[in-house]
Amino acid sequence: MIGRRQVLVAAGAVVVAGPAWATPGEVAAAVSLVTQGAALQQGQVTLELAQMVENGNAVGVVVSAVPPDGTRVASLHVFAEGNPLPNVLHAVFGPAAFAPKLATRIRLATSQTVVAVAVMADGSCWTNSVTVMVTLAACLE
Amino acid sequence: MRVLLNVPKTARRGEAVEIKILISHPMESGQRRDEMGKVVPRLIIHDFRCEYNGAEVVRLELFPAVAANPFLSFAARAEASGRFVFSWADDAGVTQTEIAEIEVV
């Protein structure tokens, strides 16, 4: 008779087929769709994100762009380099927005680098990133 | 979908109107597997829009990396009394619209 203990041990031994992480090529492709080939410069976009996160299922993020000379921000984008899919969100702020700033919660599958990109009205692209350590990954529920 | 919407009822002209919205939605990422090992299909809110008296505040494209029960917070510039219209759609074609009135002094 198969005891409960044996069933549990067998279940634990089954390898959970986890999701494949996005390759650097996929991340680069997702970013270049947004930059349209423009060079990525460091700065002007800020990403507020805890560097150490216990639960990857709901990680608070604030992304905002502060161009120094009052250039209009065309769009903001967030990418997660270590998730199965690199895109997190794309944001376009219209004339009624007070500032190009958005707070939300995201899922992080593993410890990784989260990247923010701001595309300005003149086509220039700015980036910043935060490397996050995740204790409990989001994808392995 | 149940929604918790936080929009101030009044604001002074030119001020930032802080908006917070929490939408009840599983945001199924398409990465999970059920007990049978089958992939649970993706079902997320993929588009979100906020307008203020017809002018766009923000337009978002969301991906599975956005957490379940999506929380969004952003600010609009108070111009004239009127209304905020929030609308979103998910992968199943379900759409929803919420409205909040504001008085600008």
Image (cartoon, rainbow, N blue to C red):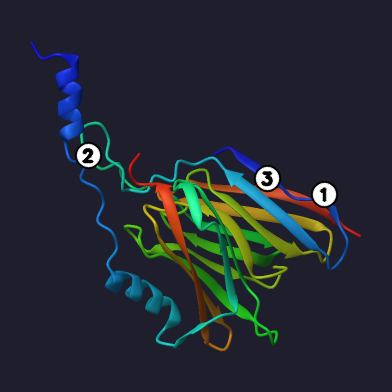
Report x, y in % for residue A20: 24, 56
The image quadrant of residue B5 is: top right
In which quadrant will I find the N terminus of chain A?
top left
Please tell me which residue lies in front, B94 or A79: A79
Q: Chain of mark 2?
A: B
Q: Position of residue A100 (x, y in %)?
A: 64, 70
Identity of the residue furthest to the top in this view:
A1
Left or right, A33 with respect to A119, comes to left
Residue identified by numbered label 3: B5
Residue under pointer 1: B9
Which label number is shown at residue B83? none
Secondary element at image label 2:
loop
Q: Which residue is mark 2?
A: B38
* Residue drawn at the location 18% of the way across and 26% of the way down: A9
Q: CA distance from mark 1 to mark 2?
A: 47 Å
Where disc 1 sits, the SS reads loop
**What is the chain letter for disc 1?**
B
Kind of residue at disc 1: Lys
Residue A77 image point, x, y percent: 50, 69
Residue neighbourhood size for the residue with mark 3, other residues' Cα within 10 Å, grouped as few (<14), some (14–19), many (≥20): some
Q: Percent position (x, y) of residue A128?
A: 51, 74
